[in-house]
Amino acid sequence: MIIAAWVIIILLFVVGMAGAVYPVLPGALAIYAAFFVYGFMIGFEPFGLWFWLIQTTIVAVLMIADYLVSALGVKKFGGTKASVIGSTIGLLVGPFVIPVAGLLIGPFLGAVIGELLVGTELRQAMKAGVGALVGFFSGLVVKVILQLLMIVLFIIWVINY
């Protein structure tokens, strides 16, 4: 039972880290679910109030930051709400239309198309597209760091129990 639990936990960690890059995967929620797998299959004893408060706070920050960092990237480059919406749609649709490259092309094209639809000049729309990419990569860095922090804290809590 313990081996099965650790296999599931590690798989959830891998899915979670992949979710930092690929937005269709659950990301931080998969990592958070791994804590419950450990609890139900091995035991909740290592986890106290502070563990759950810290991990839940990180998940909440991740969910808020995921949107805000991307939106700030677009706004910093002069984009409007249209490019924020377009880049979000492009991020979700892009990987399905163009596997792998769609992660980069999708947000860029989405932001550009969003701006063009509201009448923005091509030059400014392209600038907003670059902002979408900057926001995507900035958000990616934030997600990877915070999700790794979640995993490291879990390991520290389990080892120190």
Image (cartoon, rainbow, N blue to C red):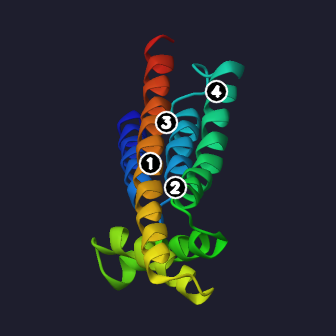
**Local crowd size for mark 1, using a 10 Å CA cut-off: few (<14), some (14–19), many (≥20):** some
- Residue at the (48%, 76%) spot, across then down: 125
Whether residue 72 sits left or right of residue 24 in the image: it is: right
Q: Earlier in the sequence, mark 3 or mark 1?
A: 1
Q: Is residue 19 visible?
A: no
Instruction: Tell me if residue 144 comes above or below residue 133 in the rendering.
Output: above
Residue at 68% x, 19% y is 50
Amino acid identity at mark 3: Leu
Instruction: Name the amino acid type tagged 2.
Output: Gly
Would residue 108 appear left or right of 89 to someone viewing this image? Answer: left
Mark 3 vs mark 1, CA separation in Å: 12 Å
In the rendered image, the vertical position of residue 63 relative to residue 74, given as above or below: above
| Neighbours of disc 2 within 10 Å: few (<14), some (14-19), many (20+) | many
In the image, residue 97 lies at what x, y percent? 36, 85
Front: mark 4 or 1: 1
Circle 4 residue: 54
Residue sitting at 37 percent across and 48 percent down? 11
Compute the Cα span from label 2 to label 1: 8 Å
The one nearer the camera, 43 or 155, is: 155
Q: Which residue is mark 3?
A: 146
Front label number (4 vs 3): 3
The residues bearing labels 4 and 1 have C-alpha atoms spaced at a distance of 23 Å
- Residue 57 visible in the displayed image: yes
Which residue bears the numbered disc 2? 73
| Residue in the foreground of this view, choosing between 138 and 45 | 138
Of callouts 2 and 1, the N-terminal one: 2
Look at mark 1 in the image and give the residue it sits on: 138
